[in-house]
Image: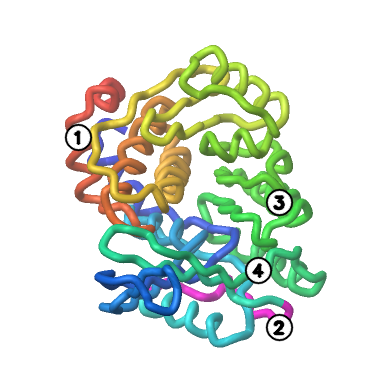
Amino acid sequence: MNSLEEIFDAFKGKTVLVVGDVMIDHYMFGEVSRISPEAPVPVLKLGKKEKRLGGAANVAMNIRALGATPILCSVVGDDADGAEFERLLEYENMPNKGIIRSQNRVTTTKLRVMSGLQHLLRVDNEDVHPLVDLDQKSLLHHIKNLLEECDLVIFEDHDKGTINPEVIHETIKLAKEKNIPIAVDPKRRNFTQYQGVSVFKVNIADLKDGLDIEFDALEEEQLEGAVEQLKNSVAAQNYLITLSKHGIFYNSKDAHGKLKSHSRQIVEVLGAGDTVISIAGLCVTLDLPLEFIAELANIGGGLVCEMPGAVPIDKEILFQEASKNPILEKYL
């Protein structure tokens, strides 16, 4: 790749299978001007309500925003929210051929009550138990069939039960048979199950939780020690550790380093990891250098933090900022 234009244009030819926990992000926006006389709680005057695709579905939204084609593969409930989830997919012009409706689960929803940019309350409705055998077999059947048309697999794990060791191991096996790269955004329950993947991307909080360790991420020596422990626990080709406002750390057998974050007007960090794994995964399909991947993902993850809620990256804004980046210029 000789230019950023070529890289962004190459994204258009990629199809990505996103496997993981999907959900509906439900927002209620309004204003608070008084405290309830019934209890010491704020009274919200409701302004508007909004429903968005969340969880692994937000990864799919990022993949599409970058120009590639996403295919979601997940299990939702055979309930009103499951129907609403498929309606949202249709509204976003995304296929539902990888979505399984199950009578054994409820569709995960997260209701966030907002006053301006202030987050007042979140209400979760979810099942977190593992899939029953029938649903698991159906999920693996869908994965096997859908892999035939895909260039990349992304596991987006939120510990809600869609992903389990058998699903992970079988999907990795099938993907490797077809030389399809795999990118992972893990959580604690299945943290060490993703052996042999192409990209293992994790934030600091989930790294500490997944390995059950404590360390100061701002101390370079402690951070590098934690990454070595990660490498001993999970074999991957590339590792990306997002450090929130402190940037991103990358590591592989050929390269490692830490990149600073860029100055932002941070509104909310929700969804930043979805953008990072989407950018990183697509870049891996193009065999780009890890430092390049880390910095482009670092830029993208920061940009979405300037917007409220989980929103996909704006490809044009990403391109404009990336085109002036000296780290990326080294490789073009």
Tag 2 and tag 3, C-beta contact below 8 Å: no
Marks 2/3: CA–CA distance? 23 Å
Q: Position of residue 201 (x, y in %)?
A: 53, 38
4 vs 2, front mark: 2
Number of the front mark, 3 or 4? 3
Considering the numbered disc 1 on the image, is that residue within a helix, a strand or a loop?
Answer: loop
Q: In the drawing, does residue 101 fall left or right of residue 292?
A: right
The magenta-colored residue range is 93-104
C-alpha gap between disc 3 and disc 1:
36 Å
| Separation of marks 4 and 1 at Cα, in angstroms | 39 Å
Q: Earlier in the sequence, mark 3 or mark 4?
A: 4
Amino acid, disc 1: Ser
For this view, does 328 lie left or right of residue 148?
Answer: left
In the rendered view, tell whether residue 325 sits above or below residue 310. above
Give the CA distance from mark 4 to mark 2. Answer: 18 Å
Query: Which residue is located at x 69 percent, y 76 percent?
Result: 105
Viewer-side residue, 33 vs 17 = 33
Q: Main secondary structure of the magenta part?
A: loop
The label on residue 103 is 2
Tell me what residue is drawn at x 59 percent, y 51 percent.
155
Gap in angstroms between the C-alphas marked 3 and 4: 14 Å
Outermost residue, right side: 133
Q: Secondary structure at mark 3?
A: helix
What secondary structure is marked by label 4? helix
Amino acid on which disc 3 is placed: Ile
- Viewer-proximal residue, 8 or 303? 303
- Amino acid type of disc 2? Gln
